[in-house]
Image (cartoon, helix red, strand yellow):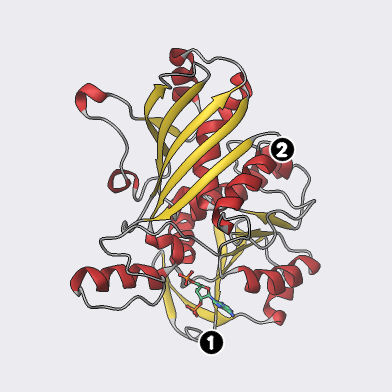
Amino acid sequence: MGLNIGVVGATGAVGRKMLETLAERKIQVDSLRCFASERTAGQLIDWKGRQIIIELLTPETMKESFDYLLFSAGGSVSEKYAAIAQEAGNIIIDNSSQWRMTEGIPLVVPEVNPHTLKGYRGIVANPNCSTIQMVVALAPLHRVFGIKRIVVATYQAVSGSGHKAIVELEKQLQDPEALPQVYPKRIAGNCLPHIDVFNENGFTKEELKMVYETQKILEDDTIEVNATAVRVPVFYSHSESITVTFHEEPDLEKLRELLVQAPGVMVMDDLSNLVYPTPLFTAGKDDTCVGRIRKDLFDPKTVSLWVVADNLRKGAATNAVQILEKMEEMKAV
Ligand code: A2P
C-alpha cells in the first residue's frame, strides 16, 4: 500500500522541489494533496502526469488523516497548522524554523542523527539549509577528531528566500534600475552580509541558527560556532567556507578518507585538474560536495574546507523526503 501525503506550501520554491523529489524517489504515493493560500488555491499542479488541484489550507484539512505532511509555508503557518495536524495524530516534517529548537522535537539530518526518529510521531523539524550541508560534511569528522570550534562564512543563493527572490534577481540582471523589494539592497552584482534579522549581539538570526542547530544535531553544546551568513547573486546552491578546529590533531589523509566514505558527501578535490565544487555544479544534485581540503598553516588541529550543496534539495526538500523515507524504513524493521 502506498502513502497518503500532503504538501503545505506546494507552490513555493521549496514546495515545488518537494513535489519533484517525491516524484523522483522510490516512495509509493497513493494520494498526494497540495495546500497553499487563497492566492493559488483552485489552480492545478501537474505531478507525474496527474493534475492535482491546490487546496486552501484550513484547520479542517489539517485535522484529516495523512501518513506524512511536508510543510514549507513559513514559520507562522507552521506554528498554527502543524500544531493542529500534530494534535490530529499526523506526522509533520516541517521546513520552517518554528519548531527546530523546541525540546522534544527531533531536528534531523538522516545521515547524521537518524536515531532521534526511532519510535517518534509528531512534528519533525528539518534544519536550516546552511546547517544541513555543514553537518553532513562535519559529522563524520566530529565522531573521530572531536570538533572544538567552527568558523564559517556562507555564500547563499537567492532561492533560499523563496520564489519572489528568484524573480527579483532575474529582473535586476535585466534592468540595472530595478528596485529591490525582497532584499534591503540590490542583490544583482552585490553581496549582502545580512540574512534574516539582526540580533542585539550583532549576529543575524540565520547565523545563530547555524550555532544552535549544529549543537543540537551533533548533540554537543560545547561546539563553538562563529558564522557570517552572506546572500550572493547566485540562483541555486549555497557555498560555505568552513574552518574547523578539532580537539585531536587530524591526519589529513584519514580526514579525506572519512569524507570519501561519508554518506551524502562527494569529495571533489583535485587542484591540478581544477576540481572543486561550485554552485552551478551542485544545482539539481542531492550530494553535499566538499573540496579545497587543507590544513591551517599555523595550527595543526585546524582544517579548512569548501562545502557546496543545492539549498532547495539537500538543504530543504531532499532532506525532508529522506526523513520520510527513514521513518518508513524504521517502521518496517
Ligand atoms: P501561495 O503560493 O498560495 O502564496 P515561497 O517560500 O517560495 O515564497 O513559498 C511560500 C509557500 O507558502 C507558497 O506555496 C505559499 O502559497 C504558501 N503560503 C504562504 N502563506 C500561506 C498561508 N497563510 N496559508 C497557506 N499557504 C501559505
Q: What residue sits right under mark 2 in the picture?
A: 221
Residue 105, relative to residue 54: is it above or below? above
Dot 1, crowdedness within 10 Å: few (<14), some or many (≥20)? few
- Residue at horizontal 43 percent and vertical 56 percent from the top: 193
Of labels 2 and 1, the one closer to you: 2
Residue 54 image position (x, y, % from top left): 51, 79
Q: Secondary structure at mark 2?
A: loop
Q: Secondary structure at mark 1?
A: loop
Quarter of the figure that contains the C terminus: top right
Left or right of 227 in this view: 279: left
Residue 129 image position (x, y, % from top left): 51, 51
Dot 2, crowdedness within 10 Å: few (<14), some or many (≥20)? few
Queried on whether the Cβ of the residue with tag 2 lies below 8 angstroms from ligand 1, the answer reads no
- Residue at horizontal 44 percent and vertical 24 percent from the top: 260
C-alpha separation, residue under disc 2 versus residue under disc 1:
42 Å
Queried on whether the Cβ of the residue with tag 1 lies below 8 angstroms from ligand 1, the answer reads yes
Residue 35, relative to residue 232: is it above or below? below
- Residue at horizontal 47 percent and vertical 83 percent from the top: 40
- Residue at horizontal 78 percent and vertical 45 percent from the top: 119
The amino acid on which the numbered mark 1 sits, given as a three-letter code, is Glu
Q: What residue sits right under mark 1 in the picture?
A: 38
Given residues 20 and 275, the one toward you in this image is: 275
The amino acid on which the numbered mark 2 sits, given as a three-letter code, is Asp
Residue 17 shows in this picture: yes
Given residues 167 and 53, the one toward you in this image is: 167
Disc nearer the start of the sequence (2/1): 1
